[in-house]
Image (tube, rainbow, N blue to C red):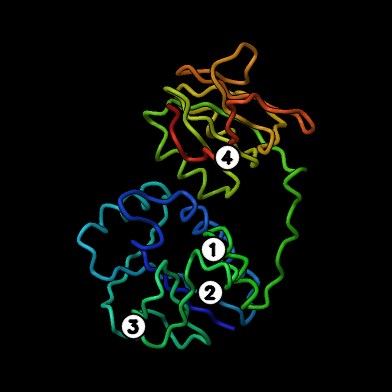
Amino acid sequence: MVLCLLIDFEEVFGPGALDPDAVAMLGELRRLRRGLNETGGDQGLAIVLVDFGSPSVMELFDDLAAATGDDWVLAQATGGGTTAGLCQGTPDRTILLARSAEPKLAGAMIWRVGDSNAGLVGSADVERRVREIMHVPIPRTIDPARRIGSLTAVPAAASAKRLLAAAYRDPTVDWLTLGMFTIAYCEDGDVEDELATSGAAVRVASAIRKRELYVTGEVPGGLFSDGGYSLIRVAEGEKPPPDAQSWSSLRHQSIP
């Protein structure tokens, strides 16, 4: 089976600034495509980034190219048009990935990010759904309670491109900003090493479970403190401080 996945670039990756989850999704799709190509079978995945005429999309696309280092191409299309010329050859199925249900291209099934009924709660679900529709084995998921990673602090002022590049290579990369530093969680050792050895980065901790991380007012003995706040670990079965907020509720945000 050959699947052509068209991605409404501004809707999925923007607007305004690159969505880190979409960048991680693109990295996952790229690795899947490479794996299918290496097997030499009759399975194929085409990934096409599509612009429907947004005046500000090129700046967003340039940011993606800078972060990923790959030669992605932005195809031009018009709303109400067809998929002709967007997919090479004759794919068995063509899907448009978007955030709205507007039928922009005749001949393409719409997958809407955020549609829980279609199994697409977020960008992280796209690669799994592609595998399902192509009948490609889906890797067994790891229980979140068992997942461990490292924490690295990088200066926030110079972190944006570096963190997007890390997320493109490792979809587990996640971060939040405390004061002048961005704290990155990472499960891939090679990606962690690249983050930790660039600039004024600081290795904060290893063998950390992200679900045990909270941010609270600055306290002694925290994993990392800056800007009047501390990142702390609350072991399973223990209660976090009353003012603490979980990592998952603050991801990709700056505090304060």
Q: Which mark is residue 45?
A: 2
Asked whether the residues under the numbered discs 2 and 4 touch, taking CB atoms below 8 Å apart as contact, a structural biologist would say no
Mark 4: which amino acid?
Val
Q: Which mark is residue 29?
A: 1
Mark 1: which amino acid?
Leu
The quadrant holding residue 190 is: top right
Asked whether the residues under the numbered discs 4 and 1 touch, taking CB atoms below 8 Å apart as contact, a structural biologist would say no
The answer to whether 144 is drawn above or below residue 207 in the figure is below
Residue for point 43% across, 83% down? 108
The quadrant holding residue 80 is: bottom left
Residue for point 46% across, 53% down? 23
The answer to whether 4 is drawn above or below residue 106 in the figure is above
- Whichever of labels 3 and 4 marks the residue nearer the N terminus, that label is 3
Name the residue beneath numbered marker 3.
85
Looking at the image, residue 148 sits to the left or right of residue 165; the answer is right
Q: Residue furthest top?
A: 220
- Whichever of labels 1 and 2 marks the residue nearer the N terminus, that label is 1
Q: Residue 51 in the image: state x and y as whole percent.
A: 30, 68
Asked whether the residues under the numbered discs 1 and 2 touch, taking CB atoms below 8 Å apart as contact, a structural biologist would say yes
